[in-house]
Image: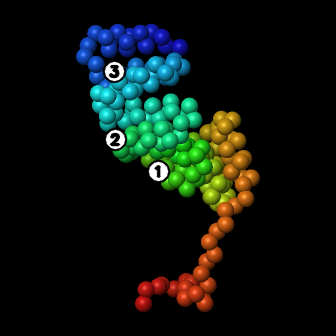
Amino acid sequence: MNTDLVLALRRALESGPPTAEAHLRLGTALLEEGAPDAAERELRAALALDPRCAGAWVNLGGILFSRWDFEGALEANRRAVEAEPTLALAHFNQGLAHLMSGDAERALDALGRALEIDPGSGAAAFHLGVALHALGRPLEAELCTAYARERDYRPGRESAAALERARSQPSPPQPAAPTAAQGERHGAAQGR
């Protein structure tokens, strides 16, 4: 625990004009101390001063996610991405919220973007694998989870359970490919 840091940040905030950065730092420290309600108040104070404070949005999204408020988490992380499009954590958090909401397609997009921004993220690769399994794409999914293992990512209990649920789901029906009789020519350029 780092209560000294929390006390120092509180004193700094009380002694000077409040800034979004000061509230963000205090909110983050409170979050690390296991005080999400107090952290949320500080993060919201940061956002009142600077509505484009990506760090406050992403941390608020984490708090909302931990309360299973996936819609709130999605909105907070959307605002974080709007403020800082290359914030991999915000894309990752969106992916998790979409997975928990049962929207594997959107999870795939968000997690893919997180991995594009941070190619070394074993967590993003693992959860991308969960989304791919849920979409009936097991070979790609296994490549992603193998990549996550190479990055020494060890999923928590809930993440591992999500992967097992996704693996055990029947594959969604795949659209049938058009046949030659339907006017589609395979292997040749179209357009004339």
Q: Residues within 10 Å of mark 2 (few under 14, many from 20)?
A: some
Q: Is residue 117 left or right of residue 22?
A: right
Whether 25 is drawn above or below 126: the answer is above
Tag shown at residue 175: none
Residue 111 image offset from top left, x and y in percent: 52, 49
Whether 64 is drawn above or below 118: the answer is above
Q: Earlier in the sequence, mark 2 or mark 1?
A: 2
Residue 8 image offset from top left, x and y in percent: 38, 10
What amino acid is found at the position of numbered circle 3 in the picture? Ala
Residue 167 image offset from top left, x and y in percent: 71, 52
Front disc: 1 or 3: 3
- How much space separates mark 1 and mark 3, taking CA atoms? 30 Å
Whether 190 is drawn above or below 123: the answer is below
Write the residue at 44% across / 25% down: 40
Tag shown at residue 113: 1
Q: Earlier in the sequence, mark 3 or mark 2?
A: 3
Instruction: Find numbered disc 1 in the image and state the secondary structure of the residue it sits on.
Output: helix
Instruction: Find numbered disc 3 in the image and state the secondary structure of the residue it sits on.
Output: helix
Residue corresponding to mark 2:
83
What amino acid is found at the position of numbered circle 2 in the picture? Ala
Q: Nearer the viewer, residue 173 or 126?
A: 173
Whether 24 is drawn above or below 4: the answer is below
**Where the C terminus falls, by quadrant?**
bottom left
Q: Is residue 116 left or right of residue 168?
A: left
- How much space separates mark 2 and mark 1, taking CA atoms? 16 Å
Residue corresponding to mark 3:
22
Name which quarter of the figure residue 138 lies in: bottom right
Write the residue at 49% across / 50% down: 110
Number of callouts in the render? 3
What amino acid is found at the position of numbered circle 1 in the picture? Arg
Q: Residues within 10 Å of mark 1 (few under 14, many from 20)?
A: many
